[in-house]
Image: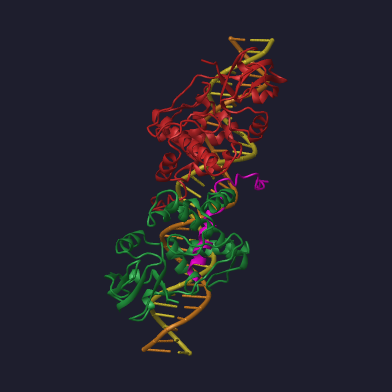
Chain colours: A green, B red, C orange, D yellow
Amino acid sequence: MSIPEPVARRTQPNADSAAEDYLKTIYHHTEWQSAPVTPSVLAATMGVAPSSVTEMAKKLSAAGLVNYEPYKPLTLTAEGTARARGVIRRHRLIETWLVDEMGYDWHEVHDEAEVLEHSISDRLLDAIDSRLGHPTRDPHGDPIPSADGSVESSPALLLSQAAIGTSGMVVRISDRDPSLLLSLAAAGIRPSTTLSVVSRDASTGFIVRVAGATESDADGGPLVPVSASGGSSIWISAPA
Amino acid sequence: MSIPEPVARRTQPNADSAAEDYLKTIYHHTEWQSAPVTPSVLAATMGVAPSSVTEMAKKLSAAGLVNYEPYKPLTLTAEGTARARGVIRRHRLIETWLVDEMGYDWHEVHDEAEVLEHSISDRLLDAIDSRLGHPTRDPHGDPIPSADGSVESSPALLLSQAAIGTSGMVVRISDRDPSLLLSLAAAGIRPSTTLSVVSRDASTGFIVRVAGATESDADGGPLVPVSASGGSSIWISAPA
DNA sequence: GCGAATTTTTAGGCGCACCTAAAAGTGCCA
DNA sequence: TGGCACTTTTAGGTGCGCCTAAAAATTCGC
């Protein structure tokens, strides 16, 4: 018979980083807004062909990590959610570590974390977590899931959905576009910055007033233009 | 024609960690003793089938990294040597970092480094190197190649090849067998320990006298048995 | 110096994660 | 409500790094 059993294949490389990437991406789609994740959206986000998504969906479904039925959106099972949070915890702790200890700037950390999140051991992750004092937010303001899988969620509002006049503190800024992070940082916008919406236009972009860290003059800060894409990358929270 | 060209395959994962492992392993075989590396030896060391070695040898040869001629031992080209040193530099810096900063013990670092050496960026490696103050030796006493590729080599003698009565300082201990490292550490043997050969027997093992760090009584230290395999993992240098 | 033992290479396959192209299913709307 | 556009799945294929089995080359012992 030429059907040798699996033998002792070296599962060496890194667990199943591809699978982890799918779980992570599915999770991301429901983290800040709850849109159902269709295969085509997932494919576009991950930069793979739709057929690749179908394949992996079946695999993950068989593994009990995603709920998959043909022609329907994908959702994570409880176990899949836990696994996704684990990956995200790794990612965000690594980003935090790179910024806090290794001299990286916040817009430079994403790619490095993307790779390391799949190769660092639990042991090392714990060591990093301890060293940093168990942080709960990464440099972009994203919550870091705790080791037990719980996530502290603070209700937030996408800048692009805030009415003119709304003001609040920047809670998070998506880390997907490094160049956006760079320009925002240059304009003085980062997590914990307070800003208010001066004008908004879905196609042109937005203009916001940035309050200095010392916000003595609450509405006297500089006016800053924010692109349309920036508007859908910045979350603010209404002040207490 | 059903021969579409390579397309834009995502070379994502991690460069070519398999190739790097071959280069590293070939290099290792010539680092402390100069034995020609035959495919079978390489296969055994790496835990792969001999045919896999042949295949990779061809690939690396085509890439100009190894000199390969059928039925002959493998050697590294200048470029292959440089690449191998690069990987080894990564490995050893990571090991040093894990021990110096992350609370690892020296026998625990090998596996973690084995994975990370393929995923850390040059940028991060440099940051680690700086943080550690550009170390030249890793926790096992192995020299860390410098960024420019040069290696500080100190002539050393394998314990198993030292005559009875020889004494010297431990220069390095191979990191291949974690349990050996553990037992040696327990016996007080690590790099920079001074010891002398009391008896040797290729099959049974060795007995060495370990001088305390304060070596006031140069030959009054405890007697310690070292297994045969330990004898071929410990390198000592004659005292100045 | 020659045949046997060992090493190495060749030949053919496998699983993985991806792809393209074609087929099938869904859903909107005139 | 029937079409048609769009989405999703199926079918078939690729490169990579690995494997086993069989063929070929080398080396060793007598």
Q: Camera-side residue: B125 or A169?
A: A169
* Residue in view at x 35 percent, y 66 percent: A213
Q: Picture coordinates of residue A186 (x, y %)?
A: 30, 61
Is B121 magenta? The answer is: no
**Residue A147 appears in which quarter of the rendering?**
bottom right
Q: In the rendering, at what x and y percent does residue A55 appear?
A: 54, 62
Residue A158 appears in the picture as rendered: yes
Q: Position of residue B104 (x, y in %)?
A: 58, 42
Q: Which residues are magenta?
A: A1-30
Name the residue nearer the viewer: D14 or A194: A194
- Determine whether, in the image, residue B21 is placed left or right of residue B121: right
Q: Quadrant of residue B123?
A: top left
Residue A201 makes an appearance in the image: no
- On the rendered structure, is B221 left or right of A55? right
- The answer to if A14 sits in the magenta stretch is yes
Which residue is at the far front? A216
Q: Give percent across and percent down for residue D8.
A: 50, 70
The residue shown at (71%, 19%) is B203
The vertical placement of A131 against B221, above or below, is below
> Left of A102 or right of it: where is B108?
right
